[in-house]
Image: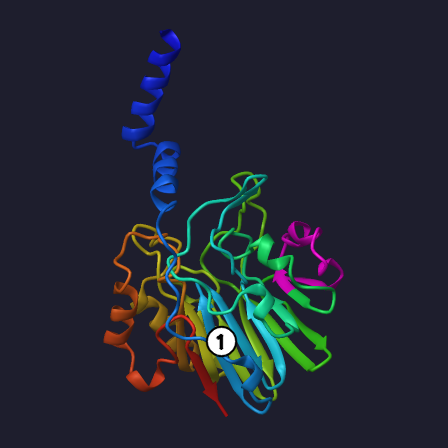
Amino acid sequence: MLTFTCLGAAGVWMGCSNQAGPRFFRGFLSELARPIVKPDHRPEPGRWVSNSLTASWLGHSTVLIHFYGVTILTDPVLYPRIGANLKIGTVGPKRLVAPPLGPDELPHIDLVLLSHAHMDHMDLPTLSHFDSSTKVVTAKHTSDILQRTRMRRGITELGWGDKTMVATKHGNVQVHAFEVNHWGARWRHDKHRGFNGYVVEREGKKIIFGGDTAWTSTFRPLRNRAPYDLAIMPIGSYKPWIKCHCNPEQAVSMANDAGAKFFLPVHFNTFALGRERRSEPLERVEAVLEPERLALRQIGETFTMN
């Protein structure tokens, strides 16, 4: 009888408590039956040409870029869930929208660009699909996480202000890391890990990948090397996390500070990480950004610039 009483009390606690553990458990259970919606668009990288900049949003902060012949993938996350990888599978938030391309449907990736070690940006199940021919640029003190992947010998760590020339079989790409306003710990104890934004340059063209960031003035010095053809910027998860995630107006402002021509919004409408409405981030971007500068709006859409 005592056992049943204890189990009943535990069930009430799990069902009613507002502590993080019970809230996470209730959220996990509520998502089990929810379907993941198929995207309305599907990129066709086999048709992309090498004399242009082409980018397709695969969800969250994952963007597939064909950069004048070199194929780049930012923060690859292509599985149904993000979170801790346990023996029973990945335990964490479930996707709202499926990726338009799965890991086995990607073209060969020349370069993986990792902004920081958070599990919604550095996803080991996805990263395990790439072999030793794929190079990696990542933040300081994060390469140890990748040592069980086949890419472990092609990793370059960058700190703020560092740059490197990445040689691939399809050409060279220069990557420059700059400071953003975020944090890098994968777990609570590893606060030493770095976090970056990047400028990627090739054939005289430049792309900004903002990674994850709250509002910061560190985009302003980038204008010294402007113009930038495209800024990939996070616009979601700002409620209530405004201290580590910018809101849409701030994202546009930072891209403008840098001198970016086109704006590609990410970090929204893929996982329910913030408390804002799903449509709110894009609506707020559209209210402050000139329509002709918005590179795309939905997962799976493709932007091309010759």
- The image shows residue 78 at horizontal and vertical percentages of 51, 60
The answer to if 268 sits in the magenta stretch is: no
- Position of 164 with respect to 248 (left or right) is right
Disc 1 residue type (three-letter) = Leu
Residue 49, placed above or below residue 258: below
- Position of 192 with respect to 16 (left or right) is right
Q: Residues within 10 Å of mark 1 (few under 14, many from 20)?
A: some
- The image shows residue 248 at horizontal and vertical percentages of 31, 67
| Quadrant containing the N terminus in the rendered view | top left
Colouring scheme, one of rainbow, by chain, secondary structure, one colour: rainbow
Task: Classify mark 1: helix, strand or loop.
Answer: helix
- The image shows residue 5 at horizontal and vertical percentages of 33, 12
The answer to if 157 sits in the magenta stretch is: yes
Identity of the residue drawn at 39% across and 80% down: 295
What residue occupies the far top of the structure in this picture? 1
Q: Nearer the viewer, residue 56 or 263?
A: 56
Image-quadrant location for residue 296: bottom left
Residue labelled with disc 1: 222
- The image shows residue 266 at horizontal and vertical percentages of 41, 67
State the extent of the magenta-drawn residues as a range: 137-158
Q: Nearer the viewer, residue 81 or 112?
A: 81
Image-quadrant location for residue 59: bottom left
